[in-house]
Image: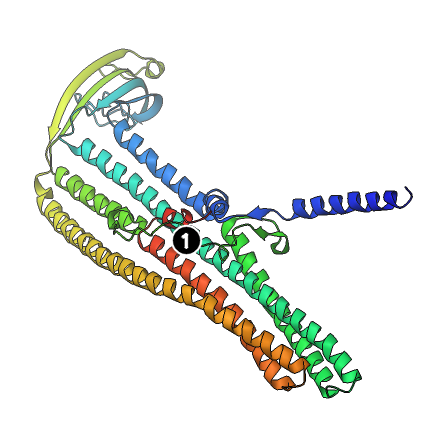
Amino acid sequence: MHQVLPCLKFCILLLLITQTVTAQSPGLSIKEVLQKVQTNLPQLEALRQQAKATEQNIALAKNTIIPDLNAGYQVNMATFNNITGMSYPGFLLPISGPPSLNNKMNFIPGSGVGALVKWNPFTFGQRDAAIERATAQFKQANAAYNEQLFQYQYSAVNIYLEVVYCNQVLKSLQANINRSKVSLEQVLVLAKNGLRPGIDTTQFQAAIVQAEMDYLQTERTCQQKITELTRLTGVETRAENIVLTDTLFNQSLLTPIDTASSINQHPYYQNLEAQKKITEAGLKEIQKSWAPQLDLWGNAYARGSGVDASGNVDKLQGFGLSRTNLGVGVQLSFPILKYNRVNIEKKQYQSLLQADNARLTQAHLDISKQIETAVMQYQQDVKIANKSPELLKAANNVYEGLRLSYETGLIDFTRLANAQYELQRAEVNNANARLQLWRSLLAIAVAKGNLNLFTEQLK
């Protein structure tokens, strides 16, 4: 009983430590990486808000159908010569009046209150063109966001693969250290019994130190890559506390890869198409700018003047409202001499539209060749990945055989060390072959603009 209690306490303590480490080491899968890139990055949030602000331009363009109504009150001082006095433009429509009989420069007060309404219910297609342009700008802003999101997600997944590969290299380096330590223990016994020279002990010790240095350098590189991964995902957890849950190298691809082209769905291509829509909408807006403009207006105001119709001055009357006026009207205007300017702008936008078409053609060519290259690379990497385990198995068999030969005194340290080095290199090459296989799969997904082609292969 006394022996069971300490063991039980130790187990409980070990469980608490394990839970603490787990809590401090959040798991991170590739699908979680894609989600965190979308939700955590401030740069993408800025693009989201810019697109949201661009959406308001549609509402502003539609809002022009609402009439403008302005109201105000004013008091002024003006010379006697204009019998109606003066008014600040904006609320009171100007009217003509009889001139004064004499040129008198004394100042007479005046006042006025009024409301002016202006309405453009018919714009001959100008409003529709403005709405279409604002809509195209909003779609382009969203397309630009999707392209940036796609690029950030690709970068994050690519770094994730590098970290997984780096961890595999660390495992190989640790296995190499362990092999050297086992060999050192054996050679110490053999040297003590006079079966091996003492220099072998020193060589194994040096090999262990070198292997540990290689491990530390690789570990530093891994931490740097994990730090970069946390930057791309917006995760604030320290790099040493991040645990990757998708090992990838221990699994095979699940389904055949869809190699069909879908260029029109690529975020980069869609962004170029959205830019072309803006140019087309701009050209349409320019074409509509030479259309007539119809203004409907109405005005109601009251005036006061410090001089009456006979020329008598009563300054106090200037602060009252003695006359009321109402007016409505229709004005149709046409920019006759604007034709040349509109024609120049049309030619400008037509050239821009041709440039957009050329960029789309080039993008179609680039993406199709990128898909072709990625598929060819993937097919070759599949063959290499299938051959790599055979090389690893052979290197392991050679090492085990030479290790037994070394223990029986048939070979020297150099041959054993070379076999151990070849085994480690085969382990790293096997991990690299798996990395390149997943990278080529990622390259296909990127070329086709659909990262789901990559994530669908994850168990």
Residue 420 shows up from this direction: no
* Residue at 83%, 43% in the rendered image: 9
Q: Position of residue 309 (x, y in %)?
A: 21, 14
Whether residue 230 is situated above or below residue 205 in the rendered picture: above
Q: How is the image coloured?
A: rainbow
Q: Nearer the viewer, residue 372 or 185?
A: 185
Q: Residue at x 78, y 45 (%)?
A: 11
What secondary structure is found at the residue carrying circle 1? loop
**Image point 64% across, 74% down: which residue?**
211
Pinpoint residue 449: horizontal percent, then vertical percent: 32, 50
Instruction: Give the percent coordinates (x, y) of residue 216.
Output: 64, 68
Left or right: where does residue 103 sit relative to residue 51? Answer: left
In this picture, residue 358 sits left or right of residue 168 = left
Would residue 63 be seen by someone viewing this image from the given angle? yes
Left or right: residue 311 compared with residue 8: left
Which quarter of the figure has residue 114? top left
Where is residue 239? Give x, y as percent: 60, 55
The residue lying toward the viewer, choosing from 311 and 148, is 148
Does residue 154 lie above or below 411 as drawn?
above
Task: Out of 424 and 372, give the one closest to the viewer.
Answer: 424
Amino acid at dot 1: Leu
Q: Residues within 10 Å of mark 1 (few under 14, many from 20)?
A: some
The residue located at (73%, 76%) in the rendering is: 186
Q: Nearer the viewer, residue 109 or 292?
A: 292
Q: How many tags in the picture?
A: 1
The residue singled out by tag 1 in the image is 253
* Residue at the extreme right: 2
Give the left or right position of residue 247, taking residue 53 as reference: right
Assign the N terminus to one quadrant of the image: top right
